[in-house]
Amino acid sequence: DPGPTSLSRDNPPRTFAQTIEVGARYRAGLGATFALDLDAGYGRYQYQFSGQNDDIDRLPDLVYSTVRIGGRLVARLGRAEAYLGGENRIVLSGGPELDQKFPAGRSADGYGARVGGSLALGSWLRAAVEGGLVNYGWTFTSDAGDMFEAEGGTDRAMTVSALVGGAY
């Protein structure tokens, strides 16, 4: 069973994660208090594991390349804003390790949800705090006798981010 219960309990695997996102946002005002933001962009999400070899074989390193399309509802409160949003993530690739482990084929889809708030620090500078949930679902094609046989898998990450950036 390659599930989480079969991983080493004495020396559990360690995780490394890295996220890079670029995108654009269009804001449509809905009166003085609310706005609707439409987002599109590219994201690269890397998840790697280190630890005992038996565990690492069960936890493939992933490097997601995705296109993000989504939106968020924004409540404007003076210099502060609060928002709730969702997005679809079109998975372009899961990285070279999945290509090697499942050469017969694989496909994935994903979604994300965010909640947060921001504060204007000047005419163009904003600071924000955001909580997020990202979920990816995989379907694998395995041939009889393949070293790795699986029908699918799920990757889920919960994040908390502190951000500072420009807005115009």
Image (cartoon, helix red, strand yellow):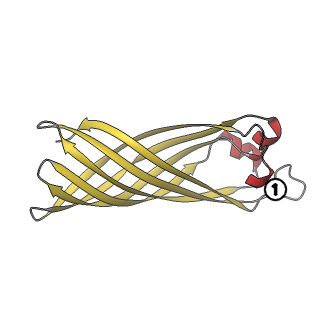
Judged left or right of residue 60, residue 147 is right
Instruction: Report x, y in % for residue 8.
Output: 79, 43
Identify which residue, 60 or 144, lies in the foreground.
60
Q: Name the residue located 81 percent from the left edge and 56 percent from the top edge.
A: 149
Q: Name the residue located 77 percent from the left edge and 44 percent from the top edge.
A: 9
Instruction: Report x, y in % for residue 29.
Output: 15, 61
Judged left or right of residue 19, residue 114 is left
Judged left or right of residue 82, residue 95 is right
Using a 10 Å C-alpha cutoff, classify the residue at mark 1 as few (fewer than 14 neighbours), some (14 to 19) or many (20 or more). some
Kindly state the secondary structure of the residue where label 1 is placed.
loop
Instruction: Report x, y in % for residue 32.
Output: 9, 62
Identify which residue, 77 or 167, lies in the foreground.
77
Q: Would you name the residue on which mark 1 appears? A: 149
Q: Name the residue located 11 percent from the left edge and 37 percent from the top edge.
A: 123
Q: Check the picture and name the quadrant holding the C terminus.
A: top left
Q: Name the residue located 28 percent from the left edge and 57 percent from the top edge.
A: 83
Instruction: Report x, y in % for residue 88.
Output: 44, 60
Say how many tags the image has.
Answer: 1
Q: Check the picture and name the quadrant holding the N terminus.
A: bottom right
Residue 161 picture quarter: top left
Identify which residue, 97 or 103, lies in the foreground.
97
Check disc 1 and give the amino acid type: Glu
